[in-house]
Every structure is written in C-alpha cells, then in structure tokens.
Amino acid sequence: MIDRKYPNTRLRRLRRNSNLIKLVSENTINSSDLIQPIFIKENLNGTESIESMPDIKRFDIDSALKEIEEIVESGINTIAIFPVIDPEKKDIKGSEAVKNDNFISTAISKIKDEFPEIILIADVALDPYTTHGHDGIILNDNVDNDLTIEILVEQALVLANSGADIIAPSDMMDGRIKSIRSALENANFKDTILLSYAAKYNSKFYGPFRDAVESASSLGKSSKETYQMNTANINEAMHEVALDIKEGADIVMVKPAMPYLDVIQSIKKNFMIPTFAYQVSGEYCMLKLAINNGWLDSDVMLESLISIKRSGADAILTYAAKEISKEIIKR
C-alpha cells in the first residue's frame, strides 16, 4: 500500500459550508458601517435621474425626505448631503454658501426635524457654489488658501447652526481644520464633529459626482492639482492626516477608496483614529454599469466594500449603501 502523507492542516475544513465560512470571517459589513450620499437640488419638483450615475437621482426637499425614510428603513443611520443650487446663485466667491437661510441649510433643518436621530454629514467646500467650479476663492489665477479658509469657516458655522451633526471639509486647504474647529468652539458648537477629507486625491474618478452637483461645466478642463493630493503619494497623506488630527479633526477620510486601500491601511495602523473611506462616483459607476449590463455578478459591489473595510475603514460612503444594506439584512 502506498504511504500517503496528508497535510495536518487543511484550511479547506473551514470552508466546508457557508455557515462555517461566516463563523470564521475576519471582516464583515454591517448597515451601521455604511453612509448614503444624497443630492438635493434647488428649484426641482420631485426627482430627476443623473445620466452618468446609474440608479442615482437628484431630489427636491420633499422627495429627499421620502428617500431618507427608505434609507432609515434599510438599516442605515447616517447620510451625507450634497447641494445642487440654482445656477443664478453661483458667483466667483461662492457667496450663497455663507447665507444662513440658503437652500441646503433649510433642507438640513427640515431633515433633522423629521429624522432627529439620523446622523447628518454636511460638506464644506465651495465648488457647488462657484461659477468656476473650484473649491475656493481664485486670486491671481490660483485658489487662494487663506481667503478660502475665511469663507469655509463661515460656511461651517451656517451648516452647524442648521443642525448638521458632522461638518466635513472636503476642500483640502491648509489649516482649515484648525480655523473651523476654533470657530465652532467659540460659537458653542463644541459637540459638532469634524470629519476631515484629510487625504483627498486629485483623482479622475470624480467625474460623475461633478455632473451630479452640476459643477463639471463650470470647472471645464481646469485642474484641482494645486490643492488636491498627487495620486502617486502616500507619505504626503500621512503628513496631511497628522496635521489635521493635531488641528482638531475627530475623523479622517480617504477619497477615493479602492485605488487607495494602501493609504487607508497605513492611516488606520499609524494613527488609530476613526477612518472613513469614500467609494466615489467613478468607482460606483464602473461597477454598477458592469452589473446592470450583466458583465459582473451583483455581489461584486459588496465584495468591493469588504475590501475597503478589510483595509481598515471604519465606515464607507457609497452610493450603493441603501441597496447593500437591504442585501445585508436579507442574508
């Protein structure tokens, strides 16, 4: 008889059935890990589709409230609001962003009145409000860092006053976290959370989002490379995160997500701070289009989110949040 030497360790023992696989799973996605972005448009009646973002819509305030009700019923308790304002209200300074009764502040107040328990994230940046599509004030053909911060501070206070739970500066100006944190403290918004887009790369994955907030035509072929990060760098991301933590950030964000899993992992390992990741519009659209055309199985979306969670992200902003949360509940 042939003496067969079998391995003592058989890793396949733990893959024998789905219950065993789940039992020893190292990472899981829960509804509480997911954040649903929502686009709310001024002077819109009902909803409208976004051509470059399959299955994603812009909402007026009333339809947004209905959408949020569905989101809550799906098990998600955090949303991120992005405004699409009247083009006639845009100017070179983004002046509409600092008005106390502006469209998005009114929307936030109504949402918090209707859903007081939901966690609402409000974006701090000027690109939805400027005629040039940049995130700040342009001076001498360049986005001026310090002038922009002055406006961002005012915008942050307006959003905090409207009821936003989390203020999320996504502009990448140097020193804005310190200035916003100081202003929030002085205005007695001591419990308002600061989520810093600390490592936001100058990525080509943002295109559909710019269509969604209707800033793409304003930006044209202009680049944000002087303030968003070089896609080749990781040490710079660590430097950005360290500075923002020192300045008062409660949470840091990496954007985009899947092309920067190494960045997410390094930040979480080195700083052990709550770390979020944004599966941006380009990432979502590539997968969603492939799913809708039958080129990929629908489970690929969940797989992509698990990879982000595995890299160290505590929570993920994704346009698939509501859909994935429903799937999680069924399983």
Image: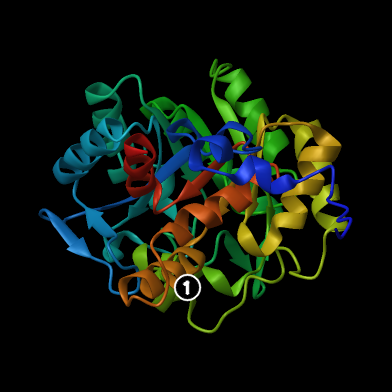
The image quadrant where one finds the C terminus is top left
Query: Position of 202 compared to 187: left or right?
Result: right
Q: Which residue is mark 1?
A: 207
Percent x, y of residue 293: 32, 77
Q: How many marks?
A: 1
SS of the residue under disc 1? helix
Image height check: is 110 above or below 176?
A: above
Q: Nearer the viewer, residue 51 or 313?
A: 313
Percent x, y of residue 139: 64, 67
Query: Residue at position x 53%, y 55% from top?
Result: 303
Q: Which amino acid, by three-letter code, is at mark 1?
A: Gly
Query: Residue at position x 42%, y 26% from top?
Result: 161
Percent x, y of residue 267: 78, 44
Q: Nearer the viewer, residue 51 or 23?
A: 23
Q: Nearer the viewer, residue 300 or 238?
A: 300
Please identify the quarter of the rendering in which residue 48 is found: bottom left
Mark 1 neighbour class, 10 Å CA radius: few under 14, some 14 to 19, many 20 or more: some
Percent x, y of residue 13: 67, 42
Image height check: is 174 above or below 76?
A: below
Image height check: is 88 above or below 31?
A: below
Can you name the residue that lies furthest to the front here? 1
Query: Position of 64 compared to 276: left or right?
Result: left
Q: Is residue 257 visible?
A: yes
The image quadrant where one finds the N terminus is bottom right
